[in-house]
Image (tube, helix red, strand yellow):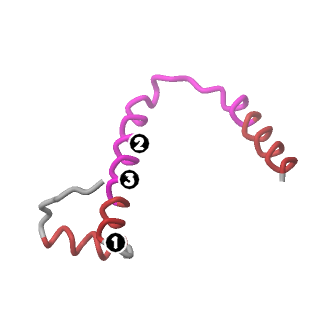
Amino acid sequence: MRTTLNISEEVMKEAEELYKANSKSAMVENALKDAIRFKKMQELMKLKGKIEFDEEAIENLRSAEIAENKNNS
């Protein structure tokens, strides 16, 4: 999708240093993906202490998934 953005030169230079992407489009896409991940993590952190997890059940599921992936390889 083509979009025109007005981004300060200072922000672009800093992003170019951080992402070292092949193009400005790739750099902006990577930065947006990072921003989305960050916001999602913030939302998850708000749930800390509000949800109980059965850590043993989660570990069992992970182990089963790993074993299944090994068997399918």
- Provide the residue span drawn in magenta: 31-59
Q: Earlier in the sequence, mark 3 or mark 1?
A: 1
Is 4 on the left or on the right of 45, as rendered?
A: left
Judging depth in this view, the residue of 38 and 6 nearest the camera is 6
Q: Position of residue 28 (x, y in %)?
A: 30, 62
Residue at the image point whose x is 65% and y is 26% from the top: 54
Residue at disc 3, secondary structure: helix
Is residue 38 shown in magenta? yes
In the rendered image, which residue does mark 2 sit on?
Answer: 41
Residue at the image point whose x is 72% and y is 31% from the top: 56
Asked if marks 2 and 1 touch (Cβ < 8 Å), the reply is no
In the rendered image, which residue does mark 3 sit on?
Answer: 33
Q: Amino acid at mark 3?
A: Lys
Q: Earlier in the sequence, mark 2 or mark 1?
A: 1
Q: Earlier in the sequence, mark 3 or mark 2?
A: 3
Q: CA distance from mark 3 to mark 2?
A: 12 Å
In the rendered image, the vertical position of residue 14 relative to residue 40, given as above or below: below
Q: Amino acid at mark 2?
A: Met
Residue at the image point whose x is 13% and y is 72% from the top: 9
In the rendered image, the vertical position of residue 57 relative to residue 34, given as above or below: above
Is 15 on the left or on the right of 63, as rendered?
A: left
Asked if marks 3 and 1 touch (Cβ < 8 Å), the reply is no
